[in-house]
Amino acid sequence: MKTELSETQRQARLRFREFVKERVLPYAPGWDREERVPTEVIDCLRANGYLGAPLPAECGGGGMDAITYGLLTEEIGRGCSSLRSLLTVHDMVTLAIWRWGSRELKAKVARSAGTGETLCALALTEKEAGSDAASVQTVAIKEGDEYVISGGKKWITFGQVADFFLVLARMEDKLTAFLVPSDAPGFSRRPIRGIVGARASLLAEMEFNRCRIPSLNIVGRPGFGLSHVFSTALDLGRYSVAWGSVGIAQACLDACLEYTASRTQGGVLIREHQLIQRKLTDMIVNTRAARLLCYRAGYLRDTGNPAAMSETLIAKYFASLAAVAAANDAVHLHGANGLTEEYSVARYLRDSKVMEIIEGSTEIQQIAIAKNPPGEL
Amino acid sequence: MTDNRRARIKEFLSRYFRNHELKDDEDIFALGFVNSLLALQLVSFVENEFGITIEDEDLDFENFRTIQNMDALIERKTADGERSLTDAVN
């Protein structure tokens, strides 16, 4: 058994790190304060092929293997969780269209989504439907050559700027997925401000007021919207969130190694204190363990193993908890400084908590993992 | 051929249907074990194990309801694949 990156993967990671160092790290605190990832950085992601990276080249995607895509997600997530969340939702929806859309729909939208020319977002959650996704109240009816959608969605990441939304609606009681363009008649959205974590991820809520879309924009067959179309998207989402969590944990570790090597208390650098060493050790070990679980999930994805989905649940569960624990300790190790905007650890703590909630909360993962125990390693 | 395919499907499903001897014509949805994760894993298994691609138009619960229905789906998809290949060669 060998768990080692190939030379190509190592080179890719260097490129991602350089990108994050130049284009993300210096600006992430400002984006967080302004609650907005700017258009220019989205253009930069697109120009570098980082939108649609895991999609096949034939639909304009980057054709990245799962491990390389994980490395990209970790590095972007280390710099800015809000920006990472754009990759997550865009790629989730693009994959679902590519996997389950009709040939006609794919011919129409897959390429522009694959290249990131059009931005996609996932519209699943409603005011009264969160973890219980099957209880969505948005409805769709067929009228002639169109579907008419009525209802509302909330907490939609990058909802303020996305061009297309993958929407879960109930059609004659069958949960069904639709692709709704932001210029469809009857569609409206408004920004959600004042969120604490992933503040720059341009959250929106939206209303579908007898919103009309062409019949071509159904994704998958009626009744398979949640079980197959959204589940495909959510599986990739969990993989991405797992790696993004590793990125946060690594950012916390980097910050703490630097801080504890420069701050003196009791006449010695604080890294010399054994209780500090204990926290650093937990951070190092948990970050490493989370990354190894991600590698494992990535390996199974690349080899087409059906167990990849169960393994991804495990990686997401562990990594999101590791990120929260690391960020909590990171703030603590920074003392009063950790509660200021001068240091990034408070942002990491706010962002890490989001990871435990999105793409299936910790409790949903606990139920799902027990019901789908993995086989032998 | 069919027996071998059915045995492989049964072996995969048995990991999730513990302590239950699944019959070829038994409705797996009615047994209450199938959640959305298993439904999608089943698609992934059938695709990778038998070298076919499940597409939008194959999404029909009937196709996955019993082992024998899955076997019939794989048979159809394999024949379609071979036909397209022959057409391409000709």
Image (cartoon, grey):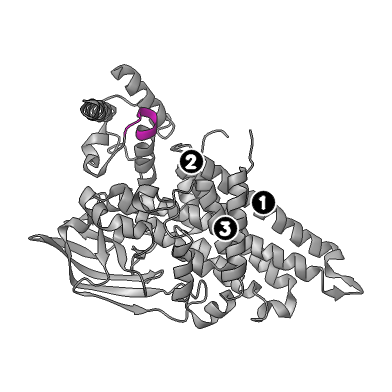
Per the image, label 2 sits on a secondary structure element best described as helix
Could you tell me what secondary structure mostly forms the magenta stretch? Answer: helix
In the rendered structure, are the residues bearing label 2 and label 3 in contact, judged by CB atoms less than 8 Å apart? no
Identify the residue position indicated by label 3 in the image.
A74
Q: How many numbered discs sit on the rendered protein?
A: 3
The image shows residue A259 at horizontal and vertical percentages of: 77, 71
Q: Quadrant of the C terminus of chain A?
A: top right
Left or right of A214 on screen, residue A99: right
| Of the two numbered discs 1 and 2 in the rendering, the one whose residue sits closer to the viewer | 2
What's the chain of the residue with tag 1? A
- The residue tagged 2 is A302
Q: In this picture, which residue range is highlighted in magenta?
A: B47-52
C-alpha gap between disc 2 and disc 3: 17 Å
- Identified at 43% across, 74% down, the residue is A202
> Where does label 1 land, which residue?
A288
Viewer-closest of A92 and A64: A64
Query: Does residue B50 belong to the magenta stretch?
Result: yes
Instruction: List x then y, in percent, for residue A55.
Output: 40, 51
Residue A329, picture quadrant: bottom right
Q: Residue furthest left?
A: A144
